[in-house]
Image (cartoon, rainbow, N blue to C red):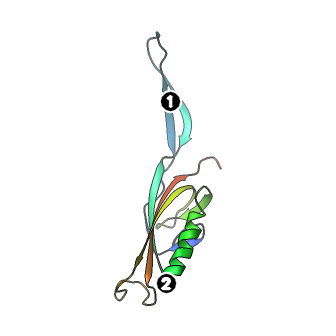
Amino acid sequence: MASIDGVDYPIMRGSPAEPVEGMDNKTRLGVDGMEDRLIGLRSADSTIETISTHANGSAAQAAKEAQSRLVGTVATLVDSFDVTHLVIIKGVEQHVRAILNPVGTGVSASDTTQLRTIWTLRKAVGL
């Protein structure tokens, strides 16, 4: 199952962008031409969406607060393909909503609240 920092998510959409070799271009005033140089591996910011369900609003709020505490940390992410990534959590956007009719949706009938989180993260390079 997909997870971030050991917390399982039944639904995870997206995967961190792979690092690529970066280029730097330089020009100097009064000098013809351009200098290109490799600057090493760089990873772009990625967004990952997770959805989890909780027994009630207070359980969803506790999960929301735990997610917020991960901002600024390095965490282990296991994506939906069971591939492990080391990522830097840069931000979270969270939405809590009531589940009106969980029957037939794959959600436990006892869960009444859904937490949808959009994670902004970057794959860690060189750690």
Nearer the observer, 12 or 73: 73
Residue 110 lies, in percent from the top left, at 46, 90
Q: Residues within 10 Å of mark 2 (few under 14, many from 20)?
A: some
Residue 22 lies, in percent from the top left, at 50, 37
Nearer the observer, 84 or 65: 65
Residue 64 lies, in percent from the top left, at 53, 70
Residue at x-position 65% and y-position 50%: 127
Q: CA distance from mark 2 to mark 1?
A: 51 Å
Residue at label 1? Answer: 24
Decide: is 39 above or below 102: above
Nearer the observer, 60 or 19: 60
Amino acid type of the residue that numbered disc 1 sits on in the rendered structure: Asp
Residue at label 2? Answer: 56
Question: Would you say 116 lies left or right of 125 here?
Answer: left
Q: Which of the marked residues, 2 or 1, is nearer the chain's N terminus?
A: 1
Amino acid type of the residue that numbered disc 2 sits on in the rendered structure: Asn
Residue at x-position 53% and y-position 80%: 58
Residue at x-position 50% and y-position 60%: 92
Decide: is 49 above or below 87: below
Residue at x-position 44% and y-position 87%: 108
Q: Residues within 10 Å of mark 1 (few under 14, many from 20)?
A: few
Residue 125 lies, in percent from the top left, at 59, 48
Label number found at residue 2 = none
Tell me where residue 100 sits by quadrant: bottom left
Q: Secondary structure at mark 1?
A: strand
The reply to whether dot 2 and dot 1 touch (C-beta < 8 Å) is no
Nearer the observer, 11 or 59: 59
